[in-house]
């Protein structure tokens, strides 16, 4: 069953009528540029074919009611009471079930942005085929689908970049995950056949054709099934190290330093902070180099950059996991052109760029390596650049 049908059926079963419409938004993979977004640097993600759907209708009350296929409970809130629920204090969990905080958080953030616009009550049912906890931004896909629905039903007329910022606010302040803007921008600005080169400081974007199809290449996702959470622990710590590094360098954000600043950084900070900083400075450069390579030479030229990015995350930023390393090493040994972990790390997915003819060989090799190591079997599937949010029905 498609996510769209599942959302419609969930809506009908929960609310006893048909939705007014179904809006969807995609998940994403990041080709390169990890943890650079909250350092105001560069990223190169693309939206994938997996989508989250929100079936929505006005309900004639002042309540927002939320259902989903991944929870048995219905969450209900008075729209005017959302201010009492959010923001979630830093380091704490939301006062509502976490999955519903993404949805309620969007309504809250939209009302903050447009306090004078009428915001009538809505019924919402969510279904998704973006794997959760796989590092493919299932959360940005929820945010994008709900933001698109409310933007239309509440007649707000907001553009995609503003809706991405609304999504980030929901994620940071309602869910309490201290993430950057990459996922929401990647989802909101998705387009077939191209990745989105994003400057996370200015939010300027450039569409970069990947050229995978013409070159007979596939981008495989290897979901390790090791699930991660960004509202906790390691992600927040990495962010704090980056902020400390920027402060020691006397700059607003690590974006303002380059490779030439590394010797100075080495003198100013402890070894761990230095290695965190080195990852960000070199990763920003790798994003720029990847854009150049894709544009000038095509996708076969980006393999080494993907591999260097993975090594930097494994050794300097220390956000990989043994399953991700096995996935990357095995894919490369089986002939992948490049491979790296993607997303926030500590689990989730790796990507591997492979010749169309080598998909089976790489897939078999990774499955075998996981079985030999006693890991849970991975999910391996191809992804391709896909369109951003849309109204499906
Ligand atoms: C998660 C966050 C993003 C970004 C990546 C790492 O996906 O949501 O904002 O920081 O991790 O690149």
Image (spheres, rainbow, N blue to C red):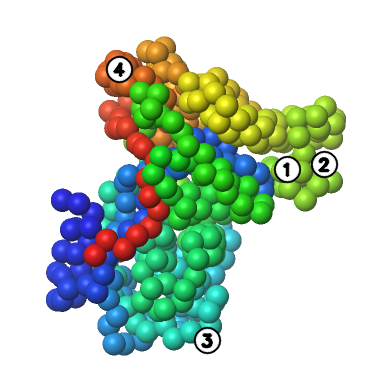
Measured in 3D between alpha carbons, the distance from the residue under mark 3 to the one under mark 4, in whole angstroms, is 57 Å
| 116 vs 91: above or below | below
The residue beneath circle 4 is 357
The residue beneath circle 2 is 249
Q: Secondary structure at mark 3?
A: loop
For discs 2 and 3, the disc positioned in front in the rendered view: 3
| 147 vs 293: above or below | below
Quarter of the image containing the C terminus? bottom left
Which of pointers 4 and 1 lies earlier in the amino acid sequence?
Answer: 1
Q: Residues within 10 Å of mark 1 (few under 14, many from 20)?
A: many
Q: Secondary structure at mark 1?
A: helix
Q: Secondary structure at mark 2?
A: helix
Q: Secondary structure at mark 4?
A: helix
Q: Nearer the viewer, residue 52 or 387?
A: 387
Q: Residues within 10 Å of mark 4 (few under 14, many from 20)?
A: few
Measured in 3D between alpha carbons, the distance from the residue under mark 2 to the one under mark 1, in whole angstroms, is 8 Å
Question: Decide: marks 2, 4 in contact (CB < 8 A)?
Answer: no
Which of pointers 3 and 4 lies earlier in the amino acid sequence?
Answer: 3
Name the spot of residue 124 as percent of width and height, x first: 29, 70
The residue beneath circle 3 is 116
Question: Decide: marks 2, 1 in contact (CB < 8 A)?
Answer: yes
């Amino acid at each position: 069953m498609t996510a769209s049908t599942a959302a419609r059926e969930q809506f009908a079963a929960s609310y006893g009528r048909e939705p007014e419409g179904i809006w969807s938004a995609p998940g994403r993979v990041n080709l390169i540029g990890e943890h650079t977004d909250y350092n105001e640097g560069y990223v190169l993600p693309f939206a994938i074919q997996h989508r989250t759907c929100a079936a929505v209708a006005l309900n004639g009350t002042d309540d927002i009611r939320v259902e989903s296929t991944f929870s048995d409970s219905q969450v209900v809130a008075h729209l005017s009471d959302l201010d009492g629920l959010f923001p979630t204090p830093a380091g704490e969990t939301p006062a509502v079930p976490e999955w519903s905080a993404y949805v309620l958080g969007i309504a809250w953030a939209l009302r903050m942005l447009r306090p004078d616009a009428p915001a009538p009550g809505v019924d919402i049912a969510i279904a998704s085929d973006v794997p959760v906890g796989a590092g493919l931004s299932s959360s940005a896909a929820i945010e994008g689908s709900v933001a698109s629905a409310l933007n239309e039903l509440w007649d707000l007329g907001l553009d995609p970049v503003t809706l991405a910022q609304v999504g980030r606010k929901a994620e940071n302040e309602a869910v309490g995950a201290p993430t950057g803007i990459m996922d929401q921008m990647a989802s909101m600005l998705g387009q077939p056949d191209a990745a989105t080169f994003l400057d996370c400081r200015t939010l300027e974007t450039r569409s970069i054709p990947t050229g995978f199809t013409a070159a007979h290449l596939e981008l495989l996702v290897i979901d390790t099934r090791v699930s991660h959470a960004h509202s906790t622990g390691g992600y927040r710590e990495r962010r704090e190290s980056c902020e400390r590094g920027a402060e020691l360098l006397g700059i607003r954000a690590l974006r303002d330093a380059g490779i030439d600043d590394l010797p100075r950084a080495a003198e100013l900070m402890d070894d761990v902070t230095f290695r965190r900083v080195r990852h960000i400075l070199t990763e920003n450069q790798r994003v720029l180099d990847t854009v150049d390579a894709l544009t000038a030479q095509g996708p076969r030229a980006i393999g080494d950059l993907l591999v260097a990015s993975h090594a930097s995350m494994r050794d300097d930023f220390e956000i990989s996991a043994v399953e991700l390393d096995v996935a990357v090493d095995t894919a490369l040994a089986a002939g992948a052109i490049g491979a790296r972990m993607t997303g926030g790390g500590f689990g989730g997915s790796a990507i591997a760029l492979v010749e169309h003819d080598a998909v089976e060989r790489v897939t078999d090799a990774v499955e075998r390596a996981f079985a030999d190591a006693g890991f849970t079997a991975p999910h391996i599937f191809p992804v391709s650049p896909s369109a951003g949010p849309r109204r499906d029905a």
